[in-house]
Amino acid sequence: MPIRDARPSDADHLVRFINMAADDLPLHFWKKSAAPGVDPIAYGRERAARDAGSFSYRNAWLAEVEGQVAACLLGYPAADAPEPIDPGTPAIFVPLLELEALAPGSWYLNVLATYPQFRGRGLGTALLAKAEAVTRGAGRSSISLIAEDTHQDALRLYRAKGYTEIARRPVVKDDWPVEAREWILFLKAL
C-alpha cells in the first residue's frame, strides 16, 4: 500500500487523525486555545498545515487505500535532554510530558490512527514499519509512544510488534470526558 509524505492540503485528515488518536484531547485543547469566535477545528487545521511545530504536516505520513487517505503516522525526534515541565503547564498534559521525558533521544511516535472503515487491513503494521525506517533515517535507535489503557487493539499491536511497556501515569481529566484511566509509555529499541 502506498505511504506518502503528508502535504499542507492534508490538514483536514491530519486534524481528524490527531484528534482520533487521543480521544478528542486535541479538540479539547483547541477549544481552549482558539481565539473567541474561531472554530477549534479550523485552529487545529491551521496548526497541521504550518511548516513547523510538532503537529506540522512535515512530521506526518499517510497510508492510502485505492487512492483514499486511510491512516496516519505522525512523529518526530524527542529531545535528547528533556526540559523541566513548566509550572504553568495545564495539569491534563503533565502526565504525558512526564512519560515523554522517560524516553529521551527516541523518535516519538505521537499519532498512529486509521479511519474505522479501513481497520483490519494491516495499515497500522505498515505505518509502524515506516516509523522504524524514519527513526533509523533520523539517526535514532529507539521509538517511543504513549497510548491510553482503553485502546486495546492498539495495545495488542504495539506489544505484537516488540514495543515494551516502560511506565504508566494516571490520566488527568479535568473537564475532558474520556474513559481512559492511564497513559502507558512504550519503547522499542531498533
Image: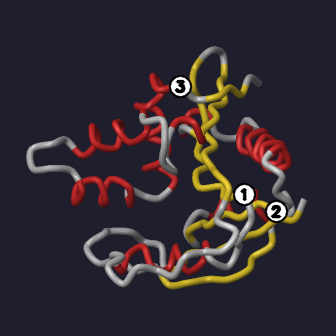
* Residue 156, above or below 75: below
The residue labelled by disc 3 is 7
Secondary structure beneath label 2: strand
Amino acid marked by disc 2 = Ser
Q: CA distance from mark 2 to mark 1?
A: 6 Å
Q: CA distance from mark 3 to mark 1?
A: 21 Å
Secondary structure beneath label 1: strand
What numbered label is drawn on residue 107? 1
Q: Who is closer to the viewer here, 100 or 15?
A: 100
Instruction: Point out the image quarter for the C terminus.
Output: bottom right
First in residue order: circle 3 vs circle 2: 3
Amino acid marked by disc 1 = Trp
Residue 127 point in image, percent of width and height: 73, 41
Callout 1 environment at 10 Å: few (<14), some (14 to 19), or many (20+)?
many
Q: Is residue 19 left or right of residue 149?
A: left
Amino acid marked by disc 3 = Arg
What numbered label is drawn on residue 123? none
Q: Which residue occupies the extreme right position in the image?
A: 190
The quadrant where residue 187 appears:
bottom right
Secondary structure beneath label 3: loop
Q: Residue at x 84, y 57 (%)?
A: 161
* Residue 14, above or below 187: above
Q: CA distance from mark 3 to mark 2?
A: 26 Å
First in residue order: circle 2 vs circle 1: 1
The residue labelled by disc 2 is 142
Q: Which residue occupies the extreme top position in the image?
A: 67
Q: Who is closer to the viewer here, 94 or 82?
A: 82
Instruction: Point out the image quarter for the N terminus.
Output: top right
* Residue 54, above or below 175: above
Determine whether label 2 and label 1 are within 8 Å by CB: yes
Q: Residue at x 74, y 23 (%)?
A: 2
**Number of numbered markers:** 3
